[in-house]
């Protein structure tokens, strides 16, 4: 399922322009829709919140590769 969602996301980016704003809009839209799908299916709120929190940490690690200069001196999160 994740591979199919990734392919759909790539197609949306291709169709609407491959720039940072488009990528963010696609990501935000997919997250928003996914939360509705989960909530409509009665997925427990704590399960949704825990997963989203885990993904924040995952994104942070992806953006700040190991061995890179400390980004927190120049950027405030």
Image (cartoon, helix red, strand yellow):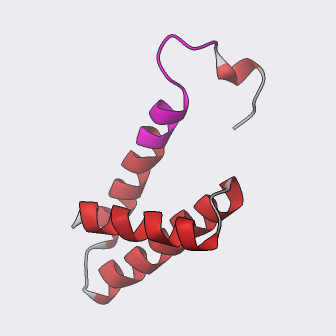
Quadrant location, the N terminus: bottom left
Q: Position of residue 72 (x, y in %)?
A: 69, 23
Q: Position of residue 9 (x, y in %)?
A: 44, 67
Q: Is residue 40 above or below residue 54?
A: below
Q: Position of residue 62 (x, y in %)?
A: 47, 34
Judge left or right: residue 69 versus residue 10.
right
Residue 61 within the magenta-colored segment of the rendering: yes
In front here: 71 or 20?
Answer: 20
Residue 62 within the magenta-colored segment of the rendering: yes
Which corner quadrant of the image does residue 41 belong to?
bottom left
Q: Residue furthest bottom?
A: 40
Q: Position of residue 5 (x, y in %)?
A: 33, 68
Magenta-tinted stretch: 58-69
In front here: 56 or 24?
Answer: 24
Q: Residue at x 61, y 60 (%)?
A: 24
Q: Is residue 18 above or below residue 36?
A: above
Quadrant location, the C terminus: top right
How many marks on residues?
Answer: 0
Q: Residue at x 59, y 60 (%)?
A: 23
Which corner quadrant of the image does residue 76 belong to?
top right
In front here: 29 or 46?
Answer: 29
Q: Residue at x 63, y 12 (%)?
A: 69
Judge left or right: residue 34 versus residue 17.
left
Q: Is residue 38 above or below residue 19?
A: below
Q: Residue at x 25, y 77 (%)?
A: 43
Judge left or right: residue 35 versus residue 23.
left
Q: Residue furthest left?
A: 1
């Amino acid at each position: 399922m994740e591979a199919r969602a990734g392919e759909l996301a790539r197609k949306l980016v291709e169709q609407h322009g491959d720039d940072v704003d488009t990528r963010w809009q696609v990501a935000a839209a997919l997250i928003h829709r996914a939360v509705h799908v989960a909530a409509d299916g009665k997925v427990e709120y704590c399960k949704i919140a825990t997963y989203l929190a885990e993904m924040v940490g995952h994104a942070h690690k992806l953006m700040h590769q190991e061995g890179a200069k400390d980004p927190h001196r120049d950027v405030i999160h």
